[in-house]
Amino acid sequence: MLSLITDPGKDPVAFTFFIGYMAMMAASVFFFFERSRVSDKWKTSLLVSGLITFIAAVHYYYMRDYYAETGENPTALRYIDWTLTVPLMCVEFYLLTKVAGAKMGLLWKLIIASVWMLVFGYIGEAYNPIYEGGTLDEATTHSVMYGVLSTLGYIYILYSAWFGEVAKLAENSNNANLKKSVRILAWFVLVGWAIYPIGYMCMPGGWLNTALEWDSTKVDLFYNIADAINKIGFGLVIYSLAISSTAEEK
């Protein structure tokens, strides 16, 4: 039973947990049902889009309860969600460019980069020294070190989407819809995914925490907004490509 310690109408963090859950569940239903309208080569992409938002919705159901019961950041639950959904978002790049000749090597490189990014991000957040009685200086060093390591994985994905293998495959495909879709997804990685470091820097020792005194309660606010924008947005871009390509084939 949900025991709210905070009113979602007054607490913006609680509000975004509820909205995120409902929005991503609705998006899952939409993507699953719309699979029947696209040609066979796009069905897997839409299936993955639906799985991304469905997995996120299930985790948001539990995260909203955890936050309501404790008022704390559900860090472990969130990273379990991301460990499943972020690699799937990278899989979407492979599925889109597969028609242009993408190989399995690209898929594995993107998955490894996303897991690398998440593992070091989790260590940076969950094992902050200040939670164990450490000093602010220790927390800052810890935050920066694991933040930099996590960013290396992000930079690889970003480079691949804008200039690397994904971008080159899309450019050489001679498919205007594919080029446009990959570029939009690249913008999601550049702008949408950039919201996550903002949340990361709100924790003790983070730059926004020490410089602007933004406390860690703002972490979930940034993360929830970013999740809804990125996961649903990714799926809608792929849905648009699948529908337009199917129409052209007919």
Image: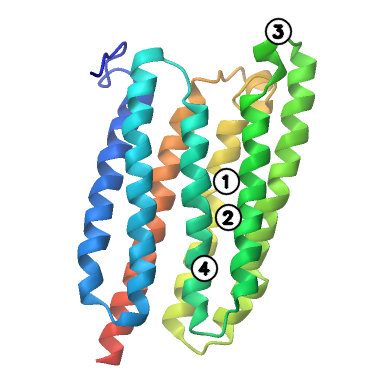
- Distance of mark 1 from mark 2, alpha carbons? 6 Å
Q: Earlier in the sequence, mark 1 or mark 3?
A: 3
Task: Name the residue rendered at 48%, 49% in the picture.
Answer: 84
**Of the numbered discs in the image, which one, if any, rests on residue 93?**
4
Query: Which amino acid, mark 4?
Result: Phe
Q: Which residue matches tag 1?
A: 194
Q: Quadrant of residue 64?
A: top left
**Residue 163 place in picture, x, y as percent:** 67, 71
Image quarter hosting the N terminus: top left
- Distance of mark 2 from mark 3, alpha carbons? 36 Å
**Of the numbered discs in the image, which one, if any, rests on residue 190?**
2
Query: Which amino acid, mark 2?
Result: Leu
For discs 4 and 1, the disc positioned in front in the rendered view: 4
- Distance of mark 2 from mark 4, alpha carbons? 14 Å
**Do we see residue 43 in this rendering?**
yes
**Of the numbered discs in the image, which one, if any, rests on residue 133?**
3
For discs 2 and 4, the disc positioned in front in the rendered view: 4
Q: Are marks 3 and 4 in contact (CB under 8 Å)?
A: no
